[in-house]
Image (tube, helix red, strand yellow):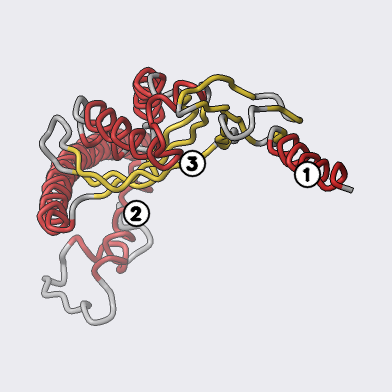
Amino acid sequence: MRKSAFLLPVIFIAIIAVLSSIFIVDEREKALVLQFGRVVDVKEEPGLAFKIPLIQEVVTYDDRILSRDVDPLEVTPLDDRRLVVDAFARYRISDVRRFREATGTGGIEAGARRLDSILRAETREVLGSVSSNDILSSDRAALMLRIRNAAIVEARALGLEVIDVRLKRTDLPTENLQATFDRMRAERVREATDERARGAEAAQRIRAQADRTVVELVSDAKRQAEITRGEADAERNAIFADAFGADEEFFEFYRSLTAYQRSLKEGNSTLVLSPDSEFFNYLKSDTAGQ
């Protein structure tokens, strides 16, 4: 009985010791085995692992890709136009031993704060080397790549791997919005005034060209009309001359009829002539020429 009473506590203590020496490494984590605060082993593969009970302890860290929002910060680009930048980063713990040495007992939160400082410094340095137009444009992937590459080098000392850095929002400070708006409006008004002036100049030039073209066309048309009228008059006179030469008496008769038609009209048929005037020769006789 005494032997059994003695063995039961021993067995119980042994079972506890065995159980406390076994730990499980999750596939989403990395584990460090610490002995009096010093790293003695790194467990990165998932599964069962062992440690010395009471003397050693296990600390785990997330092995997944983590995200970190950087607090909004003000940057001053080359053109001294202050901007408020809001960014975030995606990273993971690549060297868990180095991460433990760099952050101590602070854990992931301490590492994230250290990463914040790196990202803020690199963001200010990169964005301070370009103009605000480059930062505000849609093509700013190159700037984010520069920030990421610079942060990768700095974060390596913390055992971190920076995967990506993104600028979520880039705005003007609140106190600068009205001044910037006024400046943008003045610039747009100036551009509109320049466009109107150029438009008025082009319109005047087109109008002058059109007026000159009208004058040239009208002058040419008048010249052509005078030429045509002269040619017609010459042709008419030639016909009259031929007709007069062929039968002088008929020509005289035709000219008299034309004169009667033009002068003896309604409202204009009063003539003051002597009775023996030659104008009435063909009205007195059908042989006026005799």
Q: What residue type is disc 2 on?
A: Phe
- For disc 3, the marked residue is 67
Label 1 is placed on what type of residue? Phe
Label 1 vs label 2, nearer the camera:
1
Which residue of the protein is positioned furthest toward the front in this rendering?
Answer: 2
Q: Which residue is mark 1?
A: 12
* Image location (x, y in percent) of residue 237: 29, 37
User: What residue does disc 2 label?
Assistant: 253
Q: Position of residue 105 (x, y in %)?
A: 41, 37
The answer to whether residue 19 shows anywhere in this view is yes
Spatial CA distance of label 2 from label 3 is 118 Å
Picture disc at residue 268: none
Q: Residue at x 28, y 44 (%)?
A: 85
Name which residue lies at 25% across and 38% down. 217
In front of the other: 271 or 196: 196
- Mark 3 vs mark 1: which is more N-terminal? 1
- In three-dimensional space, the C-alpha distance between marks 3 and 1, rounded to whole angstroms, equals 45 Å
Q: Is residue 6 left or right of residue 76?
A: right
The amino acid beneath tag 3 is: Ser
Q: Is the C-beta separation of discs 2 and 3 under 8 Å? A: no
Marks 3 & 1, CB-CB < 8 Å contact = no
